[in-house]
Amino acid sequence: MREIVRPVLAALSVACLAMSFTAASNSGAFAQAKQQMAPAPAAPAQDQAAPIKQIALTDKQIDGAIAAAKEMDPITAKLSQDAKPDPKVVAQLEAIAKKNGFAGYEEYNTVVDNISLVLGGFDPQTKKYVGPEAVVKAQIAQVQADKKMSAKDKKDALADLNEALKSPPPAVENKGNIDLVTKSYDKLMEEFGGSDDN
């Protein structure tokens, strides 16, 4: 349905989902696995996402996140969003995170959230950081100009994109993260970009 909007929506959804502590690489499965690891929140509003804990990334963290995700993907891909936390799966994910240089799964999630926040602001055509608002506006223009998209699909895609403009992710606080993500952009998009084969 949304073949034309998939690349930028994926990048945007990465940023938006990062705000709600999910990653696009595994859709709901990764989110469900992360929920298994997370302690119960201290009663936030139902529709409000917890703010992302922004950190200054390092090359080692980015490399570790890519390596860990490759190992975690087959595990999290099998999870159902509605499944109850499985202690064995939680232990596996924790062990993979530690094996790849993280203190644990929570630190891995924080790193992935920060990577995702930056990825959401990249123009997939130029592979340059332009910010999530510019990405969404470019995608709106692309959808509006698409002659092959059905009227219903176009309406749905534009509604999604306009909604994304109303709820932008937070600004990247650590500007050095943009440079680090730029260096590893292709590898990161392969792993966290939301493509169907991940």
Image (cartoon, rainbow, N blue to C red):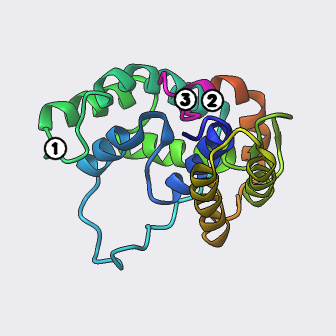
Q: Give the extent of the magenta segment.
A: 190-198
- In this rendering, position of residue 87 left or right of residue 54: left
Cα–Cα span, label 1 and label 3: 23 Å
Cα–Cα span, label 1 and label 2: 28 Å
Judge by depth and name the residue closer to the eye, 129 or 135.
135
Q: Position of residue 163 (x, y in %)?
A: 60, 67
Cα–Cα span, label 3 and label 2: 11 Å
**Numbered badge on residue 59:** none
* Amino acid residing under circle 2: Leu
For disc 1, the marked residue is: 83
State yes or no: residue 132 in magenta. Answer: no
Pointers 1 and 2 in contact (CB under 8 A)? no
Callout 2 secondary element: helix
Quadrant position of residue 187: top right
Q: Where is residue 65 in the image (x, y as percent from the top left)?
A: 51, 30
**Numbered badge on residue 188:** 2
* Amino acid residing under circle 1: Ala
